[in-house]
Image (cartoon, coloured by chain):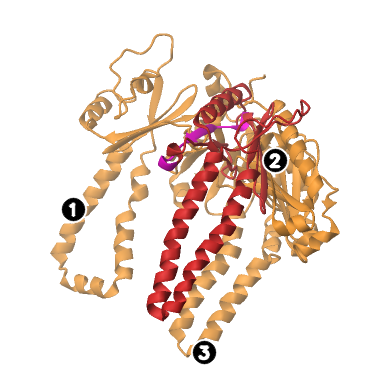
Amino acid sequence: METGTPEETGAPADQPVWRGLQPGLLRVRRLLLVVWTGVLAVAAGLLPGLFAGPGWAACALLPPVFAAWCWRLLERNWRSWRYAERADDLLISRGVLWREETVVPYGRMQLVEVTSGPVERRFGLATVQLHTAAAATDATIPGLDPAEAERLRDRLTELGEARSAGL
Amino acid sequence: MTPHDRADDRDQGMDGGIPDDAKRDRGVPDDGIPDGAERGRGVPDGGVPEHPPATGRPPVIERRLHPVTPFRRAWAPLAVLAGWAVHNPNGAQEQLTRLTGTVLLLALAVLVPAAGLYGFLSWWFTHYAVTDTELRIRTGLLFRRTAHIRLERIQAVDVSRPLLARVAGVAKLRLDVVGTDDKDELAFLGEREARALRAELLARAAGFAPETAHEVGEAPARTLLRVPPRELVRSVLLTGATWGSLCAALVVPTVLWLVTHNPWTALATALPLFGAAGASSVGRFVTEFDWTVSESPDGLRIDHGLLDRAHETVPPGRVQTVRIVEPLLWRGRGWVRVELDVAGSDNSVLVPVAPREAAEAVVARVLPGVAVPRELSRVPRRARWCVPVWWRGHRLAVTDTVFAARSGLLCRRLSLVPHAKVQSVRLTQGPWERRWGLAEVHVDTGADKTVTARLRDAREAARLLDEQAERSRTGRRDALPDRWMTTG
């Protein structure tokens, strides 16, 4: 699953068709990681180096080691995110260590939101968020292609209207 | 409708139109406003009807609150003064000595009429009207505010009569609609008027024709359950929290006194602690006194209170979750407490104390067609590695109408969610739970409450997630319509 294109697995009709996120999201997150690691490494090297002696400047190596580990974690996390549109509900599955799977029936959807921040826009990404009457419902899909996000929004709204139910 | 997409549309704005409004109000009291004129124009100041009434539609009668209303805030300036005096006693004394009799009189002569005028004007500018589909409240002296509350979205109607209001013979009417503010209550109305308005609102919300909504009147009620005072007292005495707070109120100040040898410290801690103890025992007795649950065609009625009487009405099909709570000390007597969650409402108690069978009979009325499941499945034994002792308390039952999860070992809480009220279903699993092959299933409801079945077998949980999504979809199909008297 290197790209966000539909993952055609040739599954039977009742099996959901899972889709992954755009690789751009992984790139954004890794970029942010590198930027923050740089900042932290400078801070971790300078402060002990100046106050405790030059040998302590080796602390600057800690953040890059940690970042190398996070580099892998980010990919695993990115891979774990997937969503599927079924006939009557939307499935969102995510998380590696703390797994979470959410099912939101279309009829319960009150509002579909598409957001895109400046960094996300730069990388051609958008986030779709679903709201139901329950605040605990946490149905957010980050890192979508803007066209796909809009398609999803329109489809969800349409299906939501068709299957609408109150509280 | 959602919390975001408000059930009432409001207009607020700096008012340029007071004189206009005042003129109209003085000129034509109880003026009929053509239905839709306000909404159609969307004028911030509420809209002065210049158009002739639309043909074919009956004019909307605007009404005012009870004339006693201005006095409800009469104590506010005094409270502010008292608060300031307590907060800064030295300053207050200094100021008091400086005041002379004439200044005091002068201040009174200015303050009292000013407060009176404000009260009078805010009463004068508050109107409410009931249309076919909405309750409209128009209020505000400087900042005009118009709230249109959609009747079919009513989650509950409360009439409450605080002690002083009971003396004056007035009552407060409050509508619970998802997304409304505290401001959207009608305080005060004449007692009979409040009752009639409640009946009318419920009749219209139920879908009776507007012409007959007046005549339908208050639906007859049939008492389902009444809590005798004796039972209530015993239940309060058998509650751990009562004794716990009393012990804390006795022990903590004594220890403090012995340690610090300062009686004032002890007193300062004793007072709030005794207050808490009183609130949890006497306070509970006073609010839950004479608790009556009755059934009527327009919903469930709950009447209670010793000093402040409250009358709540929950229309059918509005209850999102029901909890049956069984504290340890009540179990010997077979008593339970029933709580319920309604979207947009703060009322949570349905039955403060009752024998199990009686309580379950009431639950069957609140959630039609739901039987409280008797057989609950346990969690696998290996769950003891995740939650040491308390794993025994977690149980689950899923029937074809309801999702029921129990938790707690000493105080058992059984939460029931009808499948039709499920907003979303989630499955979560942490690393330690995966090590033992366990998972949790969360069911979210519209009252912002989540019911969780903890420590289920992972495969069972995955199946549960799938089935629950399916069940809540089919459950919704057979649910009551919003306007429950209209069929279809």
- The one of A100 and B423 positioned closer to us in this rendering: A100
**Mark 3 and mark 2 residues within 8 Å of each other at the beta carbon:** no
* Residue B331 shows up from this direction: no
Residue position for label 2: B223
Asked whether residue B400 is drawn in magenta, I would say no
What is the secondary structure assignment of the residue under circle 3?
helix
What is the secondary structure assignment of the residue under circle 1?
helix
Residue position for label 1: B110
Q: Which chain is red?
A: A
Position of B271 with respect to A133 (left or right) is left
Residue position for label 3: B259
Q: Which residues are magenta?
A: A107-119
The percent position of residue A28, horizontal first and vertical second, equals: 49, 45
User: What residue type is disc 2 on?
Assistant: Thr
User: What residue type is disc 1 on?
Assistant: Val
Structural crowding at the residue carrying mark 3, measured as other residues with C-alpha within 10 Å and reported as few (<14), some (14–19) or many (≥20): few
Disc 2 to disc 1, how far (Cα)?
53 Å
The percent position of residue B415, horizontal first and vertical second, equals: 71, 48
User: What residue type is disc 3 on?
Assistant: Val
For disc 2, the chain is B
Disc 3 to disc 1, how far (Cα)?
52 Å
Q: Are marks 3 and 1 on the same chain?
A: yes
Q: Are marks 2 and 1 on the same chain?
A: yes
A138 above or below B112?
A: above
Query: Mark 3 vs mark 1: which is more N-terminal?
Result: 1
Disc 3 to disc 2, how far (Cα)?
55 Å
Q: Which chain is orange?
A: B
Structural crowding at the residue carrying mark 2, measured as other residues with C-alpha within 10 Å and reported as few (<14), some (14–19) or many (≥20): some
Q: Quadrant of residue B222?
A: top right
